[in-house]
Image (cartoon, helix red, strand yellow):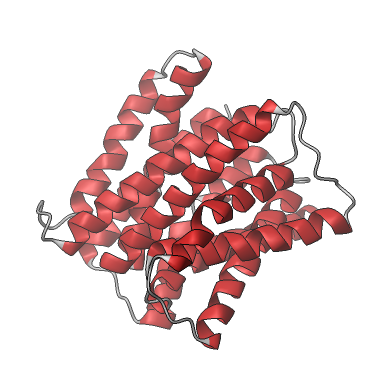
Amino acid sequence: MSPRKSLLQLHSAVLLFGFAGLFGKWLVFSPLLIVAGRVFFASLTLAVVLLFFKKGFRVSPCKDIGILLVLGFILAGHWASFFQSIQISSVAVGLLSYSTFPVFTVFLEPLFFHERINKANIFYSILCFTGVFFIIPKFSVEEASFMGVVWGLVSGFSFALLAVYNRKLTQRHSSLIIAFYQDLFASLFLIPSFFFIPVSLSLHDILLLFILGTFCTAASHSLFIHGMRRIQAQTASLISTLEPVYGIVLAVFFLQEIPSVRIIFGGAFILMSQILIAEKFFK
């Protein structure tokens, strides 16, 4: 496969990642139910992919199953807070505030791996949260954008936890196996919520959940992993910073959500910090 095709796969994957945010507006019921449908269809699709490529489902050592179980719970919380952020504010606010996760990662990794904190990362963190400050018009729990950012930061922090733990797991297991079990366990945690939260699912809702789980989760994850085979990790990381950009542009076309100058300005700070952290990490 040529590097050009790999780049196309990476951009397609990130485009699908960004597209997922729009489902928080299209599906007008509890984020817990949205995530339940997402991980259910994602785990089914990943199971088919693993069977097709004869990868197997074995996890060794067995203690990693327990770790994956905990990470499945964190994944459920991550996506639930992500869709909560988008539902109460906008796609732009949700995606940009979630995109602060690299900042959390650079502080969590030294704690988990007993590494020294890079002083430059402190500057990048200040740059990132300066962008968050610009996004918030008013610091009040009654302000939709403020609460959207709060939930987005929760989503970013939980994703950083996943990234740090997955760093250990990827040394022993393929990313597809990790994604499959995390989605599977997340669905086991969340599927019972359909019995406790009143909801009436139409065929249209089920179709949207199928697209979200199959294309915007399982397929995008597979595309990203496959595309990285001939592309440097640094390049892939920089491309991934385009997720909020793609998502915001898609929201403009499909939802007519036009971000304010304040959000664009703050988003520029957040994205710049992401790029700087990615470049510093791979030097």
Near-viewer residue (192 or 161): 192
Q: Is 1 on the left or on the right of 37, as rendered?
A: right
Identity of the residue drawn at 34% across and 45% down: 154
- The residue at 68%/50% (across/down) is 180
Is 251 or 139 nearer to us in this picture? 139
Image position, residue 80 (x, y; %): 41, 56
Residue at (76, 52) in percent of width and height: 226
The C terminus sits in image quarter: top right
In the image as oriented, which residue stretches furthest toward the front?
Answer: 195
**Above or below: residue 279 compared with residue 36:** above
Quarter of the view holding residue 137: bottom left
Task: Kindly tell me whether residue 1 is visible in this rendering.
Answer: no
Q: x and y percent of residue 184 in the render?
A: 63, 52
Work out which quarter of the rendered image holds the N terminus and state it. Answer: bottom right
Taking the spot 34% from the left edge, 64% from the top edge, the residue there is 86
Q: Position of residue 152 (x, y in %)?
A: 33, 52
